[in-house]
Image: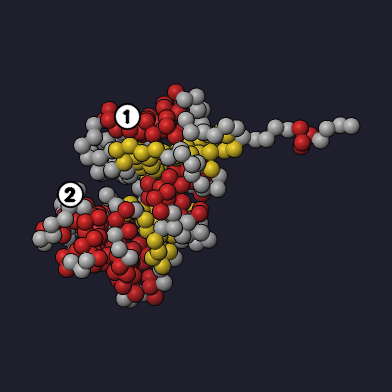
Amino acid sequence: MPTDPALAAPAAPTPYVLAVDFGGTKVEAALVDAEGRLVEGSRHRRPTGRNATVPELEESVGGVVRAAAASLPAGASIVGVGIGSAGPIDRQRGLVSPLNVPHWRDYPMRDFVAGVAAELGLAVPVTLEMDGVAITMAEHWVGAAQGVDNVMGMVISTGIGGGLIVGGRVITGPTGNAGHIGHVEVGDIKGEDTFGNPYALEAMASGPHTVAWARQQGFEGATGEDLAAAYVAGDLIAREAIARTGEAVGRAIASATALLDLELVAIGGGFSHSTPDLFDHMRDVIEHHYFPFVRKVRIVPSALSSEGPLIGAAALIHRAALLP
C-alpha cells in the first residue's frame, strides 16, 4: 500500500527570528517565534551607555547575539535577524547614531550583526530599523494596537522614540527616522540643552531629563524610580515633574495626531510606568484640544511589558510585508 506523501514528509523546522534591541542603557537579544512569543531562556542582556567604547559596545552586541543563537531549540531554525536600534539611523546603509551612545556615530550595526551571524553559520536576512518602528510593529501585531491601522508607538525611557503605522503600512521615511517623536518641539516647555535644542520633547520628558528638572527644583532623588516613589508619597516637586512631562508628551501626541489623523498611541518604556497619572496628564491635553478629530485619539499603555522591543525587532522579519 503506497505511503501518503503528506505523512512521509519531514516536518518543516520551526521558524524563529533572532531579535536584537539596542538602546541607550542596554542591548538585548532573544529568539521569537512566528506568534510573537519569546523562547524561554533565550533572552540575554548586556550594558551599553554613554561611556561605553566601540570595542565594549561590540562585545555587548556580539555577546547577546551569540547567546541567543545558542538557545535555539532542537528541530528549529533561525530565518532572519531583526534589529531595532535607538536613532537616528540610516536604514539604507545600515548605520546607527544613537544619541545617548556618543561613541557610535554612523556605526555599521547591520554589517556587524550580519558578520556575527555569519560566524554562527547563519545565512539569513538581517533587517535594521529604528526602535520606535519595531515597538509600533509589536503593538500592532500582538499588543495594544491590534486591529488599528493608524497608530503611533512610543517609548519613554532613557530617551523618547516613536514609530508610525498609517493606513496599515509602516512609515519609515527614506532614512528610517520617520516617527522620531522625541525630537519634535513642544512649544514653551523648556528642557535641558543636551542635543542643542532644549525645546525638543526628549530634552524635557525622558526619564533622566525629568529627574534632572526635578533636581533643579530641589528634589534629592537620583533616578526615575526615586521620582516615582516620591510621587506616590505625595512629594510636590515629583508631582509637578510628572505633570510637566505628561503635558509635554500630550502636546507632542496632539501635534502628531493633527498631522496624521491617528487613532491610537501605545506607550511603553521604563519611565512610562512611573505612575498611571502620567497618562492622565497626557489625556488631559488631548481632551482640551480644539479639533474633535484630535480629541478622538486614544492613549494607552503598551500591552507587551518589557518584551515589546524584542517582539518588535522580530516583527521586522516575521511581518516584513508591512515595511516599505
Mark seen at residue 183:
none
Towards the viewer: 229 or 98: 229
Judge the density around disc 1: few (<14), some (14-19), many (≥20) Cα neighbours within 10 Å.
Answer: some
Task: Find residue 101 and report its image quarter.
Answer: top left
Q: Is residue 87 above or below residue 113?
A: below
Q: How is the image coloured?
A: secondary structure
List the residue tagged with mark 1: 59
Q: Position of residue 217 (x, y in %)?
A: 11, 62
Question: In the structure shown, which secondary structural element does the residue marked by tag 1 occupy?
Answer: helix
For residue 22, say whether it is visible.
yes
Q: Position of residue 309 (x, y in %)?
A: 40, 47
Towards the viewer: 203 or 214: 214
Horizontal side of residue 180 vs 186, given as left or right: right
The type of residue carrying mark 2 is Thr
Report the label total.
2
Q: Is residue 113 above or below residue 299?
A: above
Q: Position of residue 1 (x, y in %)?
A: 89, 32
What residue is drawn where x is 47% and y is 60%?
Answer: 145
Horizontal side of residue 26 vs 73, given as left or right: left
Mark seen at residue 194:
2
The type of residue carrying mark 1 is Glu
What residue is drawn where x is 42% and y is 48%?
Answer: 307
Horizontal side of residue 42 vs 181, given as left or right: right
